[in-house]
Amino acid sequence: MASEQDVRARLQRAGQEHLLRFWAELAPESRAALLAELALLEPEALREHCRRAAEACARPHGPLPGLAERLRPLPAERVGRASRSDPETRRRWEEEGFRQIALNKVAVLLLAGGQGTRLGVTYPKGMYRVGLPSGKTLYQLQAERIRRVEQLAGERHGTCCTVPWYVMTSEFTLGPTAEFFREHDFFHLDPANVVMFEQRLLPAVTFDGKVILERKDKVAMAPDGNGGLYCALEDHKILEDMERRGVEFVHVYCVDNILVRLADPVFIGFCVLQGADCGAKVVEKAYPEEPVGVVCQVDGVPQVVEYSEISPDTAQLRASDGGLLYNAGNICNHFFTRGFLKAVTREFEPLLKPHVAVKKVPYVDEEGNLIKPLKPNGIKMEKFVFDVFRFAKNFVAFEVLREEEFSPLKNAEPADRDSPRTSRQALLAQHYRWALQAGARFLDAHGAWPPELPGLPPNGDPPAICEISPLVSYSGEVRAACPYLGLFWSQVFNTTWGEVAAWVETAQWDQWFKVAENFPRYGMGWGEASRGLCRTWEGMGMRQPRSEPSVGPDRILWGPRGGRTLASPTSLTLATLAPFSGQVRPERDRRVSCWPRVLSVVLGGLAVCVCSWPWKPLCPHPSLTPGRPGIVPGDCGSLVWPEGAVASQKVGTWPLLPARLQGLEVYLQGREFQSPFILDEDQARELLQPQES
């Protein structure tokens, strides 16, 4: 340990000798703690830190001179828009995102080092409850979204995948966060996939450049901003850990956004297909003076310009379509490749300039009394995570709807914006919209339907309180929209998903999906849908049987053509459409009730039994042997294969199918619910009970 004399000499070189002014009053253990803290401060770096803080604070605030001439909006070709893109483009982005997640190439990184002083709490923001009916915290909502997106990606691609969760904390938030996660069993995530690490701290400084003592034996320290991420990645070898796991793409976000979509496959897919090394989600500014940074170009380089740096005249400028010219509001939701982060940590981080944050910092006065100031008295120097945008070789922005993806929690009640109340209302309004889109109806306290409104109130609770667990729905998906048959065939033919994807792509697989999108609720009859399916199968070189034999749990349809003889059009339509659309229910549609409930097929020596509703877990069946079809009595709801067949080793996440394959429509369409209503996993299973009886 450094001696008192050594530390005094170091402080003198830094111009901060006052930090030992209470030395004579301290007990031995307090002296040791203070010496240990001060020994970590390099004299030259400390002197420079204090000088830059005082100079930055002294500079005049307001719009930067000459900025308007250097400012330009991002080029249109570098901006994607979730709500304004055609469905096929959006589907392509989503599919690519899910593919990367299924390949274990995507991680999420949470910025959770800040203190919740504005929120008025002494614990990390992620532990905060905004008053949801379920009582869930921000941490729990985010953990469940990770679990859900892992499940969705795994089901689409027949894999068991992991999205590692990296959590950047600080000295103030690490201990409480780690303990909270342990108390809640890591919200059923594998603890090995939750990696917590600390960012650095910097001394808080007075307006005249003196380091603040918060106690007689302790320096007032503060996290170095969310831009401290890059030093922390290097300090704790996080990028090396990502490399060992095979992670190539990182989704970085702030803890306080209750609507954040972790590892958003649409955003990930857009960035990957654009070849981006760096990307940012943005929302359209609500009004010209809204206090959010603007993602734009300065001298042709992508940057985030703070709202205070833009003049009112520039903020009011309009584009040709009538919208704000500089309308891309930054929401601290970013995409980085691991390669780009590596370049930043090793090359560009020293070039980042710290920003001034004027704060209320508790301190001890000259008499040693603790003072809690009523107005800002100190400077905290921070780096911002978005300051690296200018180093990107291929930067993109992705505009999303504010009401779907952005509602931050920053201020204590009764603030009008960014408060627990506004965060809660944003999430409940979102879930209410999802429920209505899925066909649900709500009853008020008197059992009556609430009046239909042209839109939800901008401020206030929705007409009915409905909370949907992230474990049931990730982004409000109404209908099941993933290619379950692709996964099904990959299991049956004992191939990888990539092989199946290439196979069906050449056979114009999408033709069938276009048919399926129109059946039968949208005006297409079963016969026409069946014929469309037959044409698709024939395009893949598969032979149809000449007649349709009876089908049942004790009958197997099969043929000799290398496992590619399929059952009849109607049976195939039944097996295909039921899991794909989530709309076929015998009790609701009499056209289905006369159909056989079970389709059994032998493909490549593997006996497969597909029930129209619901899907049940896979199980090996001892009565079947490779190459020999057999009768499977009574196994109406399972996919079965010969015991010992290779396919049995590739089941992945199939046992999760009963609870996961469906969209919200399966649970909510045509049903009435009393407000408040929580749709969690248990409730979802109960709603499916009539179908299983």
Image: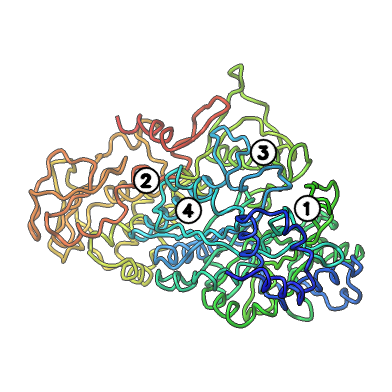
Compute the Cα span from label 4 to label 2.
38 Å
* x 77%, y 51%: residue: 362
User: Image height check: is 600 above or below 135?
Assistant: below
Compute the Cα span from label 2 to label 1.
76 Å
**Residue carrying label 3:** 425
- State the quadrant of the N terminus: bottom right
User: Label 1 amino acid?
Assistant: Tyr
- State the quadrant of the C terminus: top left
* x 55%, y 70%: residue: 233
Quadrant assignment, res 649: bottom left
Residue 363 disc label? 1
Q: Secondary structure at mark 3?
A: helix
**Residue carrying label 2:** 526
3 or 4: tag closer to the N-terminus:
4
2 or 1: tag closer to the N-terminus:
1
Q: Secondary structure at mark 4?
A: helix
User: Label 2 amino acid?
Assistant: Trp
User: Label 3 amino acid?
Assistant: Gln
* Label tally: 4
* x 74%, y 45%: residue: 411
Horizontal side of residue 241 vs 9, given as left or right: left
Foreground label between 4 and 1? 1
